Amino acid sequence: MNTNEKLPQGGRHAKPATAQPADGHARFAFFLQHLGWGARMLLAVAAISPIFFFMVWFNYTVDCSGLFHGDVYTREIAAMLLAGQNVDGYETMDERSLTKLTIEQMDAVPSTVALGSSRVMQMTRDVAGTEDFYNFGMTGGDFYDLLGTFELFEEKGSLPQNVILCIDPWLLNGTGSGDTSRSDRNLYQQFLSERLGEDVPYTVKDENALWKALVSPSYFQGNWKYWRHDRRTQAMPQAVLGADYDNSPTEIKNCDGSVHYTAAMLSQTPEQTAQYALDMAGTYAWCDGFTEPDAERVRLLKEYIAYMQDKGIHVYILLTPMHPIMYEYALTYPDDNIGFLRSEDAIRTIAAETNVPVYGSYNPHILPGVDAGTDFYDGVHCTSECLKKFWPGIEQARADEAAGIAPSAALLNTVDNDIYAELTLRCGAEKADEMAALLPLERTAAAAA
């Protein structure tokens, strides 16, 4: 071994030095190469981003399947109503969806609203007594609708100042025969859980699914097809103007939420109306198996009213009358209609316990001026003119409430003696006494004797 040969520093096992660019110029070229790759990547992202963001915006805005804004047809109806237009074809509308979309599109919920079934839908702005009014009644509106609709106000973050609550007798029917499959049970359960603190489950909207739809190329293709072609061929709702309004073959949804009936219904004779009432009286379908107001529904209704009052809302209960033929049928067959006959007293008890005024009655005989020939469309729907006979308008109702004036002092007649006499005539004295205790009827001493 040549003893003059030197080993690398660190001995025989030292690692060889890492290769480095030979000088500064080479290191700068190496940096520029990597910078170019990064720049090309950023340019590619920048080129794609507008396309991506346009797809997201287009999917959200067009929304042909109604994932974000609701059904396109119903969305258009809501926009027309809020623009002050009356729209035809009411009987074909999805009222629950329309209510939701109308509330979503409102700048704010009106100061006065009506809630209930079609039996309140003749309440217009004129009848309500204020322009700042909307009627959220709906055909077949049931117990679930009555409470669930308020959850939409909560989600909007905008509450009314006054609520006119139209309560039908079958809303207290716990058997379910007065309910409709069209109501949103999940919305109702959400209200019970979130607002009343009830221990009931409800389904939360899947936000992840909506995000996926926003970035979905296939949903973009569907929206593009709709925007380019389908929206021009799809039949859309039509506004009703002038003479067509009073002569419409279809029902009209008014811009205040009320409903204008068909020309045929508006022109029917008193005899035709009486026949409608008689046909409906023969079934009383909404009260099947209804023997007494359901205790759970009574409890929830009281809590609902108390909740609104805690929010500073003025609540008014409205009871719209039955056609005399309907009411007299119930008196003729009291055993079959005991739930109906007992419901008004239960509602008035709820009102007394929550300090809420009650306007109207199911009994047409105790409402001054109500006429069987001119104030009804059928057995259960009264006219706007009929409503005016016992609803004084929101300003007067607020003033009377502040002054402690009960609605019954001016707008109801006491006819318990007459009802007892009718029961006696139809059913005999024993059944009349039984019913007088159940309803209850407050008879004078002379009449009782």
Image (cartoon, rainbow, N blue to C red):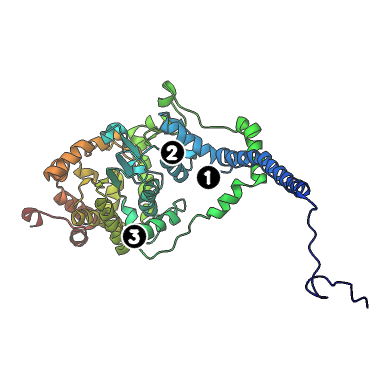
**Mark before the other along the chain sequence, 3 or 1:** 1
Amino acid of disc 3? Phe
Neighbours of disc 3 within 10 Å: few (<14), some (14-19), many (20+):
many
Return the disc, 2 or 3, that comes first in the chain's sequence. Answer: 2
* Spot occupied by residue 434 in the image (x, y as percentages of width and height): 20, 62
Quadrant in which residue 432 is drawn: bottom left
Looking at the image, residue 204 sits to the left or right of residue 256; the answer is: right
Mark 2, Cα crowd under 10 Å, few <14 / some 14-19 / many 20+, is some
With respect to residue 12, does 119 lie above or below?
Answer: above
The residue under label 2 is which amino acid type?
Gln
Q: CA distance from mark 2 to mark 3?
A: 39 Å
Residue 9 in view of the camera: yes
Q: Quadrant of the N terminus?
A: bottom right
- Give the residue displayed 62% in from the left and 47% down from the top: 215
| Furthest residue in direction right, as rendered | 1
The residue at 21%/39% (across/down) is 390
Q: Nearer the viewer, residue 323 or 226?
A: 226
Marks 3/1: CA distance? 40 Å
Q: Which residue matches tag 2?
A: 105
Which mark lies nearer to you, 3 or 1? 1
Q: Position of residue 51 (x, y in %)?
A: 65, 39
Q: Which residue is mark 3?
A: 290
Marking on residue 68: 1
Q: Are marks 3 and 1 in contact (CB under 8 Å)?
A: no
Mark 1: which amino acid? Answer: Phe
Residue 374 visible at all? no
Instruction: Classify residue 411 as left or right of residue 330.
Output: left
Q: Secondary structure at mark 3?
A: loop
Does dot 2 land on a helix, a strand or a loop? helix
Question: Residue 315 at what x, y percent from top left?
Answer: 25, 47
